[in-house]
Amino acid sequence: MQAKKRYILVIICCAFLAYCYFGGYRLKWLQKLFAISVRRNPSKLPPYHQLHYQFPEDPAATSPSTVPDDGLFAHPLFESKYIGDFQPTPFHTCRMETCFDYSKCSDRNFLVYVYPPEPLNSLGAPPPTSANYQKIISAIQESRYYTQDPEKACLFVLGIDTLDRDSLSEDYVRNVPSRLQRLPHWNNGRNHIIFNLYSGTWPDYNENGLGFDPGMAILAKASMSVQSLRPNFDVSIPLFHKQFPLRGGNTGFVASNNFPANKKYLLAFKGKRYVHGIGSETRNSLFHLHNARDLVLVTTCRHGKSWRDLQDARCDEDNREYDRYDYETLLQNSTFCLVPRGRRLGSFRFLEALQAGCIPVLLSNSWVLPFQSKIDWKQAAIWADERLLLQVPDIVRSISASRILALRQQTQVLWERYFSSIEKIVFTTFEIIRERLPDYPHRNGLVWNQSPGALLTIPTFADTPRRLPFLLDPVGQRPGPNYTAVIFVQIGAAQLSPNTALYKLVRSITKSQFVDKILILWACDRPAPTRKRWPPTGHIPLHVIPGGSSEDRPSISQRFFPHEQIETDAVLSLDEDAILNTDELDFAYQVWQDFPDRIVGYPARAHFWDDSKNAWGYTSKWTNYYSIVLTGAAFYHRYYNYLYTNWLSYLLLKTVQQSSNCEDILMNLLVSHVTRKPPIKVTQRKGYKDRESGRSPWNDPDHFIQRQSCLNTFAAVFGYMPLLRSNLRLDPVLYRDSVSNLRKKYRQIELVGS
């Protein structure tokens, strides 16, 4: 028996040695052949970024057309698939380097093409499109991203509604695969982006169940999991309901910063309970945490057509407890709001909690939070584990009051800057993709996670955040010294003389100790005066920028163009008939240095809501408050010129151009939209205009009516009213000046007749 075992062991050892010898010989032969082939023809090697190292289980599954016709590469060990040549790429392998064509994009012009609607079907009806998808299309087509020329486009957006891919939904669009193949620029999805809120259907709600192959398209998708997200390629977006606004959106519910307030409830949730199926485990266990005192977590089985047939023994009690609480009241009176997963990983509760300033407590393992690659959610949300549900009360009770304050503040920043409208969600998605372009500068985490956010911070403006007005530290940093005076000349005097308002204005500016240079924007029919007609400016440069003839009159928005001659942070915007003296200019500039993110100036106006007309009203009456400081005599940061020209909607600029009016109102709306702060008014004399100019457009009776119309148009395009009221006025006697009357710094301001 022992001899038999020895013989078997010898046979096994011999077989193993033979396998190693012949196998090793064969491997050495392949390596040698590989080296010879590369030396003979190195061009046969595919580029590194185009090679997917795939070793299929079935060699026959790989089409011969995808493998180079070479004896070496024909072997199954070296099979590979190429990106390009219209070959399909496995869904999970896509990255920007492999599935995106950078050559179609420009770092300056990131353009998006939207496919036109499909032709009418046999019944004469257009293809179905949900309200939310139509909002996405409208947001793009009314933005600066949009192009009608597909040859100029970096991204392509489908005209096919792909938001709801639940086959049981009324918004489900059928025959998507065949429709995709008919698109002229589909190219297996390369440089396309597909928006999706719901995928899969009952009973498993498969996350990847789109009903079509997205190919190399980027997915902007809600309820994405860590396992399905393609890093640096897909974008996780929030789930939003059908009534979500297109633009603007409601502001956060936290009206002031006097929190952390003592909320009635520590933790709250009110929503559906799933008796069985995916997502039921977490919500079915919430009743263990509910104590009806500081923890209110109530659910209901009362949803769906057959809920009575599926109800369990606890449903009646849950329904009674559910009806005791109002959902909005819970949101407003809770410090933390539970956000458990539903059938899918995402939930409407997430955005609702953000808006209410209720700190989200996430119970959805593996969920990739919206825009997680850019937004630091640790500053606004709390994570919990679905498997450790009973630990949630201890987790939220352990958070300090200072931490609660910081979390609540951040919920409002993120809500207002990225999530309050479909437009912001779409634009944030585009900017995340745009930052992946090799030549486009990246905004750091500080920019993305503090107000005003990345959508209003254009990185091509400057190479350092210190040049942006809202990123300056008010204690340690101040804007650059001096200012550039920009005088907009729309009427022009028949002859420039020492008695004209424009001449006096230039002379006052040259006496200022802070002026760097003077720009004259000559936008009238008369030819500009020769240099010797202007008052002497000494060492201060004076540039006259012509605006064209009467046949080619520039828009009044030219005054806010980012002229290359403006090198200072501060811009002093002036109308030609302003009559400010040097003390008024210097004092306003000193104030602006302390508030570089705002408009600081003299003439003020106000807006109000007119119930009789159901519209916004505009008034120039002297009241106890104001919301607009006219840019006919005001300081602001030059970054707002860049935003005005390169960021504002074309519809807004077109309104200004057609009316030749309202550009100052639009600039005020822009600055208030960025800062969420009102402008600042400083002390002025009774008048700041030269009333001798009889041809002034400000004397036109239609001028006031136009401005009211503009105000309502601007509010409609913004989606809300950005202007904020203030009753603050800064006077030189108490502003960084001695109280002593003998040492007043700005004495001319009190001399009315000067």
Image: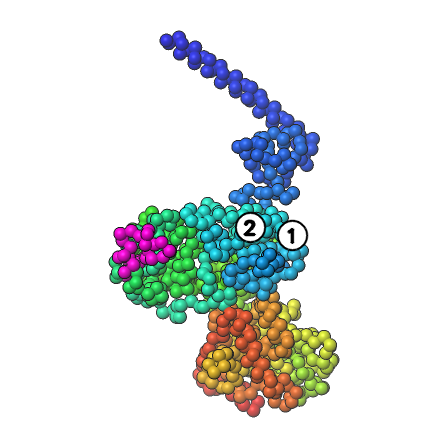
Q: Are the two marked residues, 2 and 1, in contact with CB atoms closer than 8 angstroms?
A: no
* Camera-side mark, 2 or 1: 2
Determine the secondary structure under disc 2.
Answer: loop
Q: Residue furthest front?
A: 123
Q: Find residue 445 and report its horizontal and vertical position in percent.
A: 49, 57
Where 6 falls versus 674 (above or below)? above
**Quadrant of the snapshot with the N terminus:** top left
> Which residue is tagged 1?
184
Query: What crowding class fits label 1: few (fewer than 14 Cα within 10 Å), some (14-19), or many (20 or more)?
Result: few
Determine the secondary structure under disc 1.
Answer: loop
Give the residue at x 57% y 60%: 125
Camera-nearest residue between 312 and 100:
312
**Range of magenta residues:** 294-320
Is 324 in the magenta?
A: no
Where 48 falls versus 649 (above or below)? above
Camera-nearest residue between 397 and 195:
195
**Which disc is residue 175 wearing?**
2
Q: Is residue 270 left or right of residue 749?
A: left
Give the residue at x 39% y 8%: 3
Quarter of the figure with residue 273? bottom left
Give the residue at x 47% y 75%: 724
Q: Is residue 403 left or right of residue 701?
A: left
Where 217 falls versus 73 (above or below)? below
Q: Earlier in the sequence, mark 2 or mark 1?
A: 2
- The amino acid type found where label 2 is placed reads Asn
